[in-house]
Image (spheres, grey):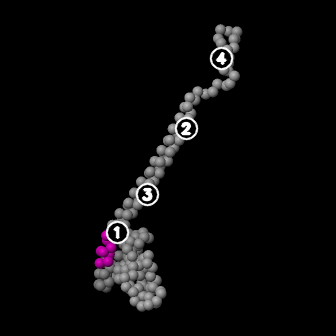
Amino acid sequence: MKKVVKQSGPVQQPVSDQPEAPKADGRDAKIIELTNDLQRTRADFENFRKNVEKDRDSARKLAKFATVEKFLPLLDDLERAITTYPELNPLAKNFEKSLTGLGLTRIKTTPGTEFDPEFHEAVMSEGEGEKETIAETLRPGYLYEGEVLRPAMVKIKLA
């Protein structure tokens, strides 16, 4: 409620019982709402960007994995050639070095090694008992960047 106070001059000024409130008219609420919307949009965009990057890395890794997998028959042939022709033994060291450089490592399958179904695929067994050890490697297995690309095919001996 405003009161009019007469002053000794020609101008009259309104006098209020309460201090004059800022003219918000819902503008402050709208600013807060828009600010919250902007923050949510930024967070959503950042999450989207991270997901796209993760998907891109996953697709790259999958493509590399599939490409290296296609070379495994060639690696098998090369290994058989090195085994068949002893004069190719110097090539074996370069071969191993190249595999390591590509991120490929051969799964350990020396006779007497304990059988591990995560890394080995048993296709034959001999003997009786509880303990499974590798007797012979039928096809080498490979790890690519620490993941099993192809399990080693082995013959196991039960003792």
Q: Which residue range is magenta in the image?
A: 68-77
Disc nearer the start of the sequence (1/4): 4
Q: Which residue is mark 4?
A: 14
Q: Secondary structure at mark 4?
A: strand
Disc nearer the start of the sequence (2/3): 2
Disc nearer the start of the sequence (4/2): 4
Residue at point 32% right, 83% down? 83
Q: Which residue is mark 1?
A: 68
Residue at point 44% right, 90% down? 128
Q: Amino acid at mark 2?
A: Ile
Residue at point 33% right, 67% down? 67
The answer to whether marks 4 and 3 mark residues whose Cβ atoms lie closer than 8 Å is no
Name above or below for residue 39 compared with residue 51.
Answer: above
Of badges 1 and 3, the one in the foreground is 3
Q: Which residue is mark 2?
A: 32
Q: Position of residue 99 (x, y in %)?
A: 37, 73
Quadrant of the snapshot with the N terminus: top right
Of badges 4 and 3, the one in the foreground is 4
* Mark 2 → mark 1, Cα distance in angstroms: 54 Å
Q: Amino acid at mark 4?
A: Pro
For label 4, the crowd category at 10 Å Cα-Cα, with few meaning under 14, some 14 to 19 and many 20 or more, is few
Disc nearer the start of the sequence (2/1): 2
